[in-house]
Amino acid sequence: MKVIGISFVLLLALMGVAAALDFFGGSPDLNASIRNIFNPFLVMETIEMVIFIFIVLCVFIPPVRQFFQKRNKSKQ
Amino acid sequence: MQENKNISFGHNEFNIQGKVKGAMASFFKRRKKSIQISKNEEPGSGQEKKKEETGPMQAGKSEESSAGKSGEASQKQPDALYTSLAANLDKIKRKTGNSPDVVIRPIKVGGAQAELETAVVYVKGLVDDQSIHDFLIESLMNNAELQKELSPEKAMKTIKDDVVAIGGIKSVKKWDDLFADLMSGNALILIDGSEEALMASTQGGQRRSVQEPTTNVAIRGSKESFTESLETNQAMVRRIINNPDLWVESMNLGKMTKTSVSIMYINGIAKKEIVDEVRTRLKQIDIDSILESGYIEQLIEDQTMTTFPTVYHTERPDAVAGNLLEGRVAVFVNGTPFVLLAPAVFIQFFQSVEDYYARFDISTAIRFLRVLIFFISLVGPAVYIAATTFHQEMIPTALAIIVAAQRESSPFPAFVEAIIMEVTFEILREAGLRLPKAIGATVSIVGGLVVGQAAVQAGIVSPAMLIVVAITAIASFATPSYAIAISARLIRFLFMVSAAMFGFYGLILALIMLIVHLCSLRSFGIPYMSPLAPVIPSELGDTIVRKPLWAFGKRPQLIAAENRTREGKNQKPKPPESRGMKHYTRKEEKDET
Amino acid sequence: MEKARISAFQLFILIVLFELGSAMIVPLAIEAKQGAWLAILIGAAGGCGIFLIYYALFRYYPDESPVHFVRHIIGSVPGKIVAFLYILYFLYLSARVVRDFGEMLITIAYVETPLFVLNLLMVLLAVYTIRKGIEVLARTGELLFIVLAFLFLSAFLLIAAGGTLDYGNLKPVMGEGLAPIVKTAFTQTIYFPFGEIFAFMMIMPYVTDPKKVKRTGLLAITASGFVLASIMAANTGVLGVELVNRSLFPLLATIQSIELADFLERLDVYFMLAAIIGGFVKITLFLYVSVAAAADLFKVKKPSQLAYPLGVVVLLLSIMIAGSLPEHIQEGIKLVPLYLHLPFQVILPALVLLVAFVRHKGRGKEGEAK
């Protein structure tokens, strides 16, 4: 769980960096820069989207498994 | 003679049954273990199951002990032999299930007045009949000393010291040792009234004789190959290295089969840590049967999730000797001509003993060829697929036109074509391998001519594809080690898939992944890719290139221990300074120094 | 930190592969025109200079990762903030390199393949390698180095033998004086690629013999400087300044110009192999450094657990980073050196070194002995 938290915080911060660079790079306003960040995901094809979701879901496998293992242990 | 044949057949059958049972038992055991690990909430049941599994042995023991106690009150140890001959023989009969090949031959000694019952017990077929008859039974019957009046102890001593004309003789007091020896082909002498039995080493029987190697064939070099007999194999290595520092340790592995396994190394050259590691890993093996050295190999590997062999195996005594001299440890297993060598490094699988017998320039060229061959057998079809489907522009124009013209008539994409041909080829190879030789030739004709030729003429596959597959196939045959060739065979399909999906990008990524994987492997703690990565400059001379024999200074530093000097300095042969008589003076000089 | 050890030679190879990584495929320092190679060499000299800053920091704490010792130097909370910023910086750079390679692949061969998928494969390979640890990466580097060296030597031979090299294209070296060359060196080449060696701060503690780090680092920077300079010189010599300036990947064009014996032509595979090897090492090292640093900072027991999630972060970022290739390149040339490289590679380390220097001097010999 901790690992996912760390990754999420880092991802958010990095999106901020990307938006900021976009803004400094001559984007009209901050809103547009933020929209620019999400643009690539909006134009994905179906198959790409499936792979994308699969890859992201794979991140959650180890923590979930760990969680269940812990629960099993505590039950004992 | 006929009898012998029958016995050997029976033996075989027994072996086969044992194999099936062994495989099943090990399968179940593995499953149980995994259950035990995954379901931690019920450790009790898992333990119980395991106990049941190991049951027969322990049950046997407890039965013995109870029998011992009821039979003889004076017994101190539960495992010890009885004093009465009849009780002992009865026990042997019961334990072996009255099997007819366990021969019990009662002999009376001690003259007519004070008869002393003795018996000789052995297993037919496992023993050398001649030594049983000539040196054991006949001596026992005709020896003058034994015709006098004797106490059991005295008789025992006489038999041991004067009567039995056989090299190895020892006394046994425990049932476990007794049965282990009896079943490995020793003859047992029991005397009424003695708590000891004598064990004469009479191992023999029919074995395959020493023949030429069938797998690691070399043009130059010894024509001997190992046999199925552990002792013969060890002796063959000892005949090459006549040195007391060649040490052997033996043990019995496999709870049911009690296979003798021994490790051999040269004291002072082999690193102590590696020998210890091999020993501990072997001792940790807890399995019902060891039927081939492959069992051991799979149980002592560093990593099992890999297609690459991390233990080397060979059936050539000179290869074993050479590797022992580099500091490796050999593991001999009774019943197989394949001897294991550890630790193994990747580059070792591209070397053959012949490289050291031929001159260095030739060996170097051949080693380069072998690496190229391995590479071709890995990526051959993958490169074809990538080039024809993704990167047509990279093929030289003239060639591209020819290939394109051929591909025009082919109904399948290159990947499907390649998969069809590769799978066909694998089927042919497997069929040719398992069939008797006479039919094998037919298969290769049917496969090569009919399938290949007809497939092209019918337009199902393009001729270029067939050429690629054929070259790949020949390349995989030319790899010196079968173990590494077969892993290349498997990985080839992965490469084909990645090339079909992403062209050269996929192929290169797959290659890098292969390199990462190879670099992550270790064999008994030694990096698998050493001395290439991590690079050890002084040892690069015996990898893909082979430096001249006179320049081999040291043994490999990761493997060998303190005695690393291989040869003296100034080993480079020189011509005499001038023609004629100087020739002889040079020899004299050398003698002086 | 893992319990791993790499040799000084492995460090050398990793630095060289890392520096060549993406720098060899782009038109590096082309603002300096024919003097590009000179600008690269000056950049390498500058890179040696800032490497000495990092080395001085490393000498204070030779066994600790920077994430730890920065806290000793500037205090716990500011230290953590700085470490966090650096993790962001490395992840961002990693994503930039991934994007570079994805765009390169699309441009040269994979017009129809989605960027996302191409990047995904690269990131997955990097994650796989990181999970195996730094030792495996170092050993892999040794083998890949052999491949790359073979490619370079044979490519140079082929270019020389092919007769496409025109020395006239290399003149005049200083047509507009030294000023533009020096300016290019100080605005570009010092930071990219040479300043990026900062990532090796996380790897230096693994080296078996810390005394050799200085020599190895300087040697590696110099060597890669010379290789990059000769690549740029070959590009300019074969294509001419105008063409180099206009093409996105001049090395590809140079290699494509090789034509020998009607058979050795269109050696794009050469370029792809070299580029992918370089890109792989660079991406993996950046990602490894961020994983190791994040594991240190957030006290994750098994760093390998972080490899995949952070890999996915890099993957996502690599496609969010810019809308199009021109935008991506524009950001890379104009914004990143100014807003990211300069503060993170030079200003912050120099400040930290200054504080460390003052503190250790204050503490006297006791501190230095540590």
Image: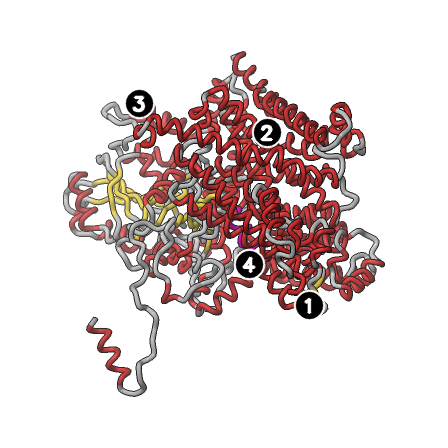
Q: Position of residue B559 (x, y in %)?
A: 38, 49
For the residues beneath circles 1 and 4, the answer to whether they share a chain is no
Q: For the residue labelled by badge 2, is the local secondary structure a helix, a strand or a loop?
A: helix
Q: Is residue B326 above or below residue B29?
A: below
- Label 3 to label 4, Cα distance in Å? 69 Å
Q: Which mark is residue B241?
A: none
Q: Are marks 4 and 2 in contact (CB under 8 Å)?
A: no
Near mark 1 (Cα within 10 A), the count class, few <14, some 14-19 or many ≥20, is: some
Is residue C147 covered in magenta? Answer: yes
Residue B14 seen in the figure: no
Q: Which of the image's four quarters has the C terminus of chain B?
A: bottom left
> Which subunit holds the residue at mark 2?
C
For the residues beneath circles 3 and 2, the answer to whether they share a chain is no
**Disc 4 designates what residue?**
B371
Identify which amino acid the numbered label 2 is placed on.
Leu
Q: Which mark is residue C260?
A: 1
Q: For the residue labelled by badge 1, is the local secondary structure a helix, a strand or a loop?
A: strand
- Label 2 to label 1, Cα distance in Å? 47 Å
**Which label lies toward us, 3 or 4?**
4
Q: Main secondary structure of the magenta part?
A: helix
The single residue placed furthest to the bottom in the displayed view is B580
Near mark 4 (Cα within 10 A), the count class, few <14, some 14-19 or many ≥20, is: some
**Which label lies toward us, 1 or 4?**
1
Q: Is residue B491 above or below residue B43?
A: below
**Disc 2 designates what residue?**
C88
Q: What's the residue at 78%, 57% (across, down)?
A: B461
**Disc 3 designates what residue?**
B70
| B466 or B316: nearer the viewer | B466
Magenta residues (range): C141-150
| C145 or C16: nearer the viewer | C16
> Which subunit holds the residue at mark 1?
C
**Which label lies toward us, 3 or 2?**
2
